Amino acid sequence: MSRNGDQKPIMEAMLFLSGEVLTVQAFREVLGINDAEVRRLMSELIEEYRDRNGGVLIVEIANGYQMVTNPIYAEWIKKFRAAQTSTKLSMPALETLAIIAYKQPIIKAEIEQIRGVNSDSALRTLSERRLIKIMGRKEAPGRPFLYGTTREFLEYFGLKDLTELPTLKDLQREEAA
């Protein structure tokens, strides 16, 4: 149970950490307060963020609340995202991406079987950078997600299409040289 004055900062932290829309029920369950109190506190937070006119706002979306970037800074956010995407990928991310590129559509369990390690972080990074996407679900127990590459993947590596990926023979020739 939170202390009275801690409720707004806790709500703010919840919004920041989730990155998703949080419902009144989510706040109610964590804070132990009624719906009307959640709505009142959220209204205050929304107004405080709006008055501050900073880089982040809290908005009411789809029967819940979410922390979002302020649209007046969209131009700079786009530049930032573009700069982030152009940074190098880690070796685990590259390994995972190579497996997906050559074996797509592929499920996480198959990727991890090939790599021999958990691939959660690499999959998250590749998804955030929009180099991979969920292509559907496999007709198997649990209906796991099938992963594949995106148009951004082709752009990132300067490929016209997947047929331009080097073959195993090409890679072996380069290794021998």
Image (spheres, rainbow, N blue to C red):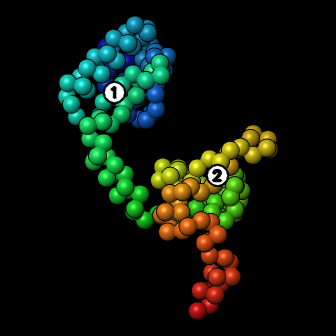
- Mark 1 — residue? 58
- In the rendered view, would you say 40 is above or below 121? above
Rendered residue at 49%/63% (across/down): 155
Q: Residue furthest front?
A: 160
Q: Nearer the viewer, residue 173 or 19?
A: 173
Looking at the image, residue 79 lies above or below residue 71 = below
Q: Which mark is residue 7?
A: none
From the viewer's perspective, tell me whether residue 52 is left or right of residue 109: left
Residue 63 position within the rendered picture, expressed as x and y whole percent measured from the top left: 47, 18
Secondary element at tag 2: strand
**Amino acid at the residue labelled 1:** Ile
Most extreme residue toward the right is 140
**Residue 87 drawn above or below residue 1:** below
Residue on which the image places disc 2: 147
In terms of secondary structure, where does tag 1 sit?
Answer: strand
Asked where in the image residue 95 lies, by quadrant, the reply is: bottom right
Q: Position of residue 61 (x, y in %)?
A: 43, 23
- Depth check: give the residue in front, 12 or 105: 105
Q: Earlier in the sequence, mark 2 or mark 1?
A: 1
User: Disc 2 to disc 1, how far (Cα)?
Assistant: 32 Å
